[in-house]
Image (cartoon, coloured by chain):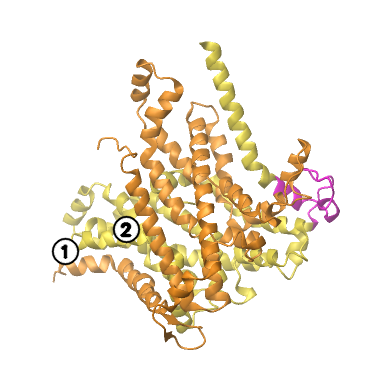
Chain colours: A yellow, B orange
Amino acid sequence: MRTRRRIQTVTTYLLLAGASVLFVLPLVWMVCVSLKPSSEVLQFPPRFWPQHPQVDAYTAVFESEGFDFPLYARNTLIIAGLSLVGMVLSSAIAAYGFARIPFRGRNLMFGVCLATMMIPFPVIMVPTYVIFKHLGWIGSFKPLWVPAWFGSAFNIFLLRQFFMGIPKELEESAKLDGCSTWGCFWRIIIPLSTPALSVVGLFHFMAVWNDLIGPLIYLSHQRQFTLALGLQFLQSRSGDTPWNQMMAASTLIVIPVLVLFLLAQRTFIRGITTTGLKG
Amino acid sequence: MKVPQWIKGLLWTSPWWLGFIFFLAGPMAVSAYLSLCDYPLLQPPVFVGMDNYARLSTDPIFHKVLANTLIYAVFSIPLGTILAIALATLLNRNVRGQAIFRACIFVPTVVPVVAVAIVWMWMLNPQFGLVNQGLRQVGIDGPMWLASPGWAMTSLILVSVWIIGAPMVIYLAGLQDIPVSLYEAARLDGASRLGQFRHVTLPGLSPVILFNVVISIIAAWQVFALPFVMMKSSPGPDRSTYFYTMYLFDNAFRYLKMGYASAMAWIQFAIILALTGLVFAVSRRMVHYRGA
């Protein structure tokens, strides 16, 4: 019995270690290739580790016309910042309405809100483009952050569930002391909801950082590109971009989210298990 | 003066319903109308009735993207589900360092899709890529992967399996929710490990599986960024990796056939609704809700 147990534990560890290596390997290789000189990249047979590690590919990427990392990072952060504040604030306000303000038709309204989660983005892709074009927003950041100020059904749902779990007594006693509804929301609910709000914020940031199709549709000048779009653009002409530079650019765009993940791992895991959201 | 309750409610929920009107219901109405129009973007839309839908039904490329998307879903969803459950089961065995293993397997999921695509383009490079080098070492001459019509789709399905961190974590939480007492009872009844998995784990996990499968179906019909980047915004060899949303995107923003693209969008919506309904109907007997 004991030996059987032993064997099972060892197999479990071996399988997990093997899977972990397989999953991390491509990322390690990405960094390895980015540190290789051009001559080593096209060496056959390929070697895993760089023989003469160097950062030439990174300096080349920073100097190249095709991929202006600081500018794209700035653009991405502006869009992410503007939409993050809007997303968290507006979702929380609407969620509070659905959780705490009883009014006629509220349940019906919330049902419609939930149903809208089923609508795939491509269905509204064409008409929103047409509408933004009429508003003169194409070629600006506006299509990428203004809609975030109207919340998202998913985040509203998530926050509403969280708010419902907060005891009502807190707000009731505050109201007796003359606190307004807004006061209850701002001074009681918001401070108590940081775990849920950080999940919403973190996932929204990741979504903006990763988004390709939004910037691809709405941005028209290279000076406005986000990191994801800039990288795609660099790659689409990779006939003239060496692969060590492609990997250097990829590493640069991966590192911030990697750091964020390592710092906020718990928030990530909690967010996914409570929401089922794809990160 | 006291504000009536319904005004208060409407004010608080206003971010949602304003957004609903301007960014969802409004655009959907516009889209429904555009799907009945010829609209080359630069000229005003002309009403053509069901023309777009009729033309779609005889468009060979439309049939191709439908088939491709279906093939992708049919293979990537079961493969991803099995792998995610297997990994979650391993992680759920009282292992030391669980957090480290979990982090390693999860990490690819936070990598931006564009970077995922670029890394794998080089991983799968027939000559300089790591995959074929690994195969060479065990004496196999690897295929051309992304450049071969027969292997390009397989490549994409394999890459999709690399980013299964989210479902895996959900399965892990699902496994931890299954009461230990059920396993003890099964063991007392003499159930083997496989029997326990079949009669305790799977039923306990079934609501989570349903949830993940539905999400994956919706996601599969929207696959865009991965093939778009990996195939350099082309339909792939022999159009073998041309997906539904890519063709929709090309119709809208490359050929400026906004009406045609809108009709495609509505068909896509109908397919997603139908498939989700089908999955719910089929799963009714298979999903086991504890306490229900």
| Direction bottom: furthest residue | B43
Assign the C terminus of chain B to one quadrant of the image.
top left
Of the image marks 2 and 1, the number of the one nearer the N terminus: 1
Residue located 16% across and 65% down the image: B5
**Relative vertical location of residue B271 with respect to residue B108 in this rendering, above or below:** below
Quadrant of the rendered image containing residue A25: top right
**Relative vertical location of residue A196 with respect to residue B246 in this rendering, above or below:** above
**Relative vertical location of residue B185 with respect to residue B225 in this rendering, above or below:** above
Q: Residues within 10 Å of mark 2 (few under 14, many from 20)?
A: some
Badge 2 amino acid = Leu
Which residue is the site of mark 1? A104
Q: Magenta includes A40?
A: yes
> Can the viewer see residue A180?
no
Which residue is the site of mark 2? A114
Secondary structure state at the residue bearing disc 1: loop
| Direction front: furthest residue | B58
Residue B84 is situated, as x and y percent measured from the top left of the image, at 50, 40
Total marks placed: 2
Q: Give the letter of the chain under mark 1.
A: A
Q: Observer-nearest residue: A48 or B204?
A: B204
State the extent of the magenta-drawn residues as a range.
Answer: A29-56
Residue located 66% across and 67% down the image: A233
